[in-house]
Image (cartoon, grey):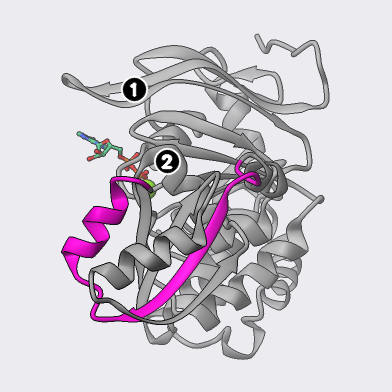
Amino acid sequence: MSNTTSDNRIAIQTSNISRNFGDFIAVNGIDLSINKGELFALLGPNGAGKTTTIKMLCCLLRPTSGTATIMGHDTLKDPIAVKQIIDLSPQETAIAEHLNAWENLSLMGRIHGFGKDEVKKRSEELLEMMGLRSRAKEQVRKYSGGMKRRLSIAMALVSDPQVLFLDEPTLGLDPQSRRSTWEHITELKGKKTIVLTTHYLEEADSLADRIAIIDEGNIIALGTPGELKDSISDMQVMVVKAKSLTNDAIEGLRKIYPEIKEVDGGIEIKAKELNFNEIVDYLRSKEVVIESTSQKQVTLDDVFLHLTGKELRE
Ligand SMILES: Nc1ncnc2c1ncn2[C@@H]1O[C@H](COP(=O)(O)OP(=O)(O)O)[C@@H](O)[C@H]1O
Ligand SMILES: [Mg+2]
């Protein structure tokens, strides 16, 4: 009893999907429409509702209200059909630490009902694809965080899912391992529909075709990385590097320019119209010694700060 969506370019569609935990609203009526072959990022801070959303789409958690379809199959009416075409690399990876990568993949293949030869072939391909081949016979507990994450992605790919969910695929990794994982995810782009959650702006910016910014259970912005930045392209960002910046000086400036971010060695001030001279004069009047001033391109970080008044810190 699977529904077919009227638009067959759409892979995932949600309608007003919500989830409460007691009185607390974790996901507050989200409408998403994700295209086949798209890499879609759900970007938001800890506690925003990313994992809860993913779990509802993967039939692991019942929505309190609303509906979702994956490739036309309703997650509530037809979870078996949904589970056949999706796979998930969860935030808390589910790898058997005492087994090696090869054994983890084989186990997953057998669970999905593939024959021995098929499992061997798929495991070899995936080990190669995720850059794990040379260490495939070592126990996973000896792997670095990055290798475990890549194995977790490989395990989600064993079933050759049409839709792949990656919940925080680089959580806790150092920048270098994160970049290497991005390269492996990039190789999947266009081949599968991918929904990725992250709280790393740079990750969403460099990988995603489109980004939905989620905060406190609500989608507060949605678009390509370029569109999101364009939405505040009429904003200017001034960077002031200065010693002796006091809270008093910053708070005084905030009365005129509310969007001030403290950065290493100075501040960034964002507004539609910035009067550089006025800012310099004001800071001097507060006996701040200015080292330099410059102008900066807006980033997704600025988009987030502008929309929520909060910084999305790593
Ligand atoms: N099983 C649960 N019981 C109660 N609260 C939960 C449960 N799961 C998640 N939450 C709460 O819902 C909010 C969203 O959580 P989550 O979806 O995990 O956020 P994210 O993945 O964006 O960090 C958080 O405030 C979290 O504490
Ligand atoms: Mg999460």
Number of labels in the image equals: 2
Q: Which residues are magenta?
A: 232-256
Would you say 21 lies left or right of 169 here?
left
Would you say 111 lies left or right of 207 here?
left
**Mark 2 CB near ligand 1 (8 Å cut):** yes
- Assess disc 2: are there few (<14), some (14-19) or many (≥20) residues with their C-alpha within 10 Å of its C-alpha: many
Residue 236, horizontal then vertical, whole percent: 57, 53
For the N terminus, the quadrant is top right
Q: Which mark is residue 261?
A: none
Against 128, residue 311 (above or below) is above
Residue 230, horizontal then vertical, whole percent: 68, 44
Hey, what amino acid is under mark 1? Answer: Arg
Residue 254 among magenta residues: yes
From where the camera sits, is residue 167 visible? Answer: no
Residue carrying label 2? 50
Residue lying at 77% horizontally and 35% vertically, measured from the top left: 36
Would you say 14 lies left or right of 122 here?
left
**Mark 1 CB near ligand 1 (8 Å cut):** yes
Q: Which mark is residue 19?
A: 1
From where the camera sits, is residue 246 visible? Answer: yes
Residue lying at 48% horizontally and 31% vertically, measured from the top left: 220
**Quarter of the image where ligand 1 sits:** top left
